[in-house]
Amino acid sequence: MARIVECIPNFSEGRNKVVIEKIVDAVRNAEGIKLLDYSSDSDHNRTVVTFFGTPERVEQVILDMAAKVYENIDMTLQQGAHPRMGALDVVPFVPISEVTMDECVALAKRVGNEIASKFDVPVYLYEKAASAPHRENLAVVRKGQYEGFFEKIKEDKWAPDYGKAEVNVKGGCVAIGARVPLVAFNVNLGTDNIEIADKIAKTVRNLGGGLRFVKAMGVKLEDRNVAQVSMNLVNYEKTAVYRAFEMVKMEAKRYGVPVIGSEVIGLVPMEALIQCAEYYLQIENFSMDQILEKRIWE
């Protein structure tokens, strides 16, 4: 089997289609790389890209993509509902085939060092690549966002892992890490009250005493005039998608608010959706071998 690493960079632009395509072209046109997916959200003002290849090719292509990001995005002008600390906001590496987590950690460190040196952007390592326990959680690292980092970065506790302890005014900062696959899952509420979404998110997420492997926040979708509970399920095998969905529904009832839909951002492991099918359809003794497409392509 080939050595495969998945990379899911998020950059802080979800509205300007010309800029988005220019940045994604750095991946789309790269030899030896497979662009799996990219999706943009105008309310979040954010784009998520998913691609894979050998560790060597992924390393080069993410640096090429970073060059396009820093050339085309100015954080002094950027606004959006999603928390962000920089133009190239977060870059996770995920081991897929014949690659260990330790190798992805080493990859994150090499890329982090190169981005700091080449683009003069402070770099923070997170998740499995974190240099200290308090830096493992991306939400904690990113707290304060771009605007708050001008003061946060001066604290000894938050000196960057690579680069100067000084925010790049145009590019901001970036978090780079290694992690297992996650599911980005959002639930839309039948209300425009962001305070309700915030309260539900605080109850559902791990930091609020909710589900162990869930990060959540409330977001307002201006184009639809609805509030959303935006979640990252960082270990879908231990906290299934349907559990997060059902808990959001249960908490929404406290406020007399219905759930009107949900969405997955980026790609999702097949097993995560099979778990949902088993739960909602009450399928007994179901096996991955019963998936038609899986058997066809074996």
Image (cartoon, rainbow, N blue to C red):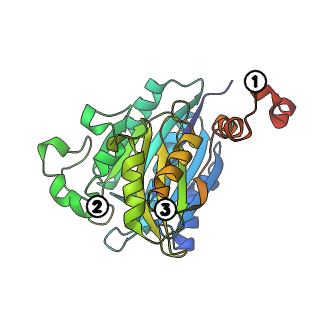
Picture residue at 67% right of the left edge, 37% below the top:
279
Decide which of 167, 259 is in the foreground and name it: 259
Callout 1, which amino acid? Asn
Distance from disc 2 to disc 3, alpha carbons, whole Å, reads 22 Å
**Residue behind mark 1:** 285
Where in the figure is residue 281, as x and y percent of width and height? Answer: 74, 39
* Residue 111 appears in view: no
User: Which tag is nearer the camera, tag 1 or tag 2?
Assistant: 1
| Tag in front: 1 or 3 | 1
Residue at (30, 44) in percent of width and height: 124
Q: Is residue 170 left or right of residue 251?
A: left
Question: Residue 255: x, y in percent?
Answer: 44, 61
Say what secondary structure mark 3 lies in.
strand
User: Looking at the image, is 83 positioned above or below residue 223?
Assistant: above
Q: Which amino acid does label 2 sit on?
A: Tyr
Mark 2 Cα within 10 Å, few/some/many (few <14, many 20+)?
many
Rendered-image quadrant of the N terminus: top right
Which disc, if any, is residue 228? 3
Looking at the rendered image, the quarter that the C terminus falls into is top right
**Which of pointers 2 and 3 lies earlier in the amino acid sequence?**
2
State the image quarter where residue 282 is shown. Answer: top right
Task: Provide the secondary structure element on which disc 2 rests.
Answer: helix
Q: Mark 2 points at which residue?
A: 146
Across and down, in percent, residue 53 comes to: 61, 38
